[in-house]
Amino acid sequence: MFKIDTFDFAGKKAIARVDFNVPLDENFVVTDDTRIRAAVPTIRKVTENGSIILMSHLGRPKGVTEKYSLKPVISKIEELTGKKVKFATDCIGEIAEKAAADLKPGEILLLENLRFYAEEEKGDKEFAKKLAKLADIYINDAFGTAHRAHASTAVIADFYDDNHKLFGYVMEGELHSLDQVLRSTKKPVTAIIGGAKVSSKITIIENLLQRVDNLIIGGGMTFTFVKAMGGKIGSSLVEDDYIETAKTVIAKAKERGVKLYLPVDSVNADKFAADANVAFSAIDQIPDGWMGLDIGDRTIQLFSEVIERSAVVLWNGPTGVFEMEKFEKGTVEIAKSLVKATVKGAFTLVGGGDSVAAINKYGMETKVSYVSTGGGAMLEFLEGKVLPGVACIPR
């Protein structure tokens, strides 16, 4: 098994699955280059002595669709790498094969959108074989699609022996960071799980109960737990079908010696709107007609103390409706606590769409240890599921 750092790419062609599914404006200009930027170290490493063929999807096209072409991404790759990028107007067949054959050491080739072929998402072996035909080495550097058993993310690896398939720097970084949380020998380990619904996070919570010392619950899912404990939640979001599940989580945490932290006070609104009237109460004493949309100051202090004395912290999900200024304080303060914990030497991992959006919004993304771009893949990894894009390459 090889690591990308120690692999000799001299005179070799590598085909790398990257995640260039990036947002474009109405003029087809990339508006967020985070994913492209993340792939640059892998591109640079390979092109020191070898050549690289980049493959990705963009959007959800139904067959060949011009607005989903990867052509607009070329200028951004060139800007970030300082190299010219060749483009193949197909990802398999004669056009792709000729472009790959003509590639010289140090050069970059981008293939057209993989999802122009339905075979990509079906995990078709023949399609994967045609992709594998283009290069000597396979690199998976697209953690964001690692939970999909698609042709380019997993099946293609079957056509390479163990010495010719490896992870890129993005994949290595994501897996190392998640291992730091799930297999940490440093204590205490704290997980902050927020978001709207218990139903979307219950598998993660159950898996983390076996691995963490502290579990902090925030966001809309709080109120299912509060109601399960007999509290008054007004018109706050609740999943009545998950009240028994919440009770089970509380019992399991106690049984396993995990300290479960729920909010103690709440910032309430009389409607779900930016211009709502605001009032404050204990978390279990929300009046009828009012809904909890953020954690209060006593909760911020409680949670911050737990976070700042932790050795490892995972943050997945905001603690309130941070998109509205009146209800963002809790999420802002949690982000600040993560930064303080990082300064003290803790390993801090932020992951999941809303958490990443929040840490970026407040300009703190470089002040924590790692920000995962994995989305669904990260959530499935935290649930304990085997990701096809990870399992296909020996670690």
Image (cartoon, rainbow, N blue to C red):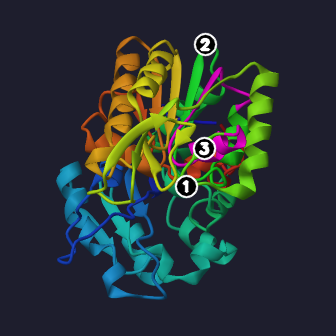
Give the labeled residue for mark 1.
237
- Please rate how many residues cluster around mark 3, counting C-alpha atoms within 10 Å: few if below 14, some from 14 to 19, many from 20: some
**The image quarter in which residue 182 lies:** top right
Residue type at mark 1 is Leu
Q: Which of labels 2 and 1 is toward the front?
A: 1
Q: Position of residue 148 (x, y in %)?
A: 62, 62
Q: Is residue 391 visible?
A: yes
Q: Residue at x 44, y 16 (%)?
A: 308
Q: Residue at x 54, y 51 (%)?
A: 234
Q: CA distance from mark 2 to mark 3?
A: 35 Å
Q: Position of residue 357 (x, y in %)?
A: 35, 48
Give the labeled residue for mark 2.
187
Q: How many marks?
A: 3
Q: Secondary structure at mark 2?
A: loop
**Span shown in magenta:** 209-230
Which residue occupies the foreground of this view, 150 or 105?
150
For residue 227: magenta?
yes
Q: CA distance from mark 2 to mark 1?
A: 33 Å
Sequence order check, earlier mark of 2 and 3:
2
**The image quarter in which residue 128 lies:** bottom right
Q: Position of residue 57 (x, y in %)?
A: 45, 69
Q: Is residue 11 visible?
A: no
Residue type at mark 3 is Lys
Sequence order check, earlier mark of 1 and 3:
3
Give the labeled residue for mark 3.
232
Which residue occupies the foreground of this view, 253 or 110?
253
Q: Residue at x 41, y 26 (%)?
A: 300
Side of 354 where 367 appears, left or right: left
The answer to whether mark 2 and mark 3 are in CB contact below 8 A is: no
Side of 96 where 123 appears, left or right: right
